Amino acid sequence: MKRVFLLTFLLVLIAGTGVAFCDVQTDAVPEVPVKGMVTMVDVGADKCIPCKMMAPILDELKEEYKGKAAIVFIDVWKNQDQAPRFKIRAIPTQIFYDRDGNEVSRHVGFMDKKSIVAMLEQLGVK
């Protein structure tokens, strides 16, 4: 009985100090889709293997399409509220939006650069 009381007392004491047992890190999530611009959103996680494989491709595309199309990455392990928002069932998932903000295509799994570029061109991005 003394142990339960002592443990409860310590938990209350620690909670009162503001020490958190679980710290969920969140990243700022950009407004998606980007208004007036073709947008590709890659929903994944920094620690997911196929997502890691796509990271350099996304970095290249961000540079190549700067000002022409928005390339956005959202980490759903850090921003868990985003998975239901985008109706994610598996990661990575790529979602393509036209200039009017309408979802026009969705792909689940690793997507190579050539396929992403083809989809962006199909949406009128050159």
Image: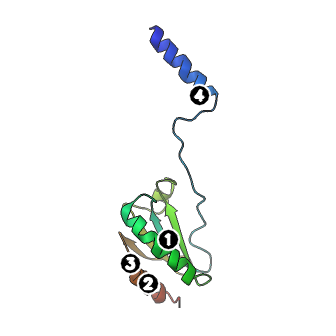
* Mark positioned earlier in the residue sequence (4 or 1): 4
On screen, residue 34 above or below 64: above
Q: Which mark is residue 112?
A: 3
Q: Secondary structure at mark 3?
A: loop
Residue under pointer 2: 119
* Badge 4 amino acid: Ala
Q: Which mark is residue 85?
A: none
- Based on the displayed image, in which of its 4 quarters is residue 16 positioned? top right
Residue under pointer 1: 41
Q: Label 2, label 1: how many angstroms apart (C-alpha)?
A: 12 Å
Q: Label 3, label 4: how many angstroms apart (C-alpha)?
A: 47 Å
* Mark positioned earlier in the residue sequence (1 or 3): 1
Residue drawn at x 42%, y 80% is 113
* Mark positioned earlier in the residue sequence (3 or 2): 3
How many labels were placed on the picture? 4
Q: Residues within 10 Å of mark 2 (few under 14, many from 20)?
A: some
Kindly give the residue lying farthest to the top in the view shown: 2
Q: Nearer the viewer, mark 1 or mark 3?
A: 3
- In what quadrant of the picture does the N terminus appear? top left
* Badge 2 amino acid: Met
Q: Residues within 10 Å of mark 4 (few under 14, many from 20)?
A: few
Q: Nearer the viewer, mark 3 or mark 2?
A: 3
Residue drawn at x 55%, y 49% is 25
On screen, residue 4 above or below 81: above
* Badge 3 amino acid: Asp
x, y percentage for residue 19?
Answer: 59, 33
- Based on the displayed image, in which of its 4 quarters is residue 49 positioned? bottom left
Residue under pointer 4: 15
Q: Residues within 10 Å of mark 1 (few under 14, many from 20)?
A: many
Residue drawn at x 51%, y 79% is 61
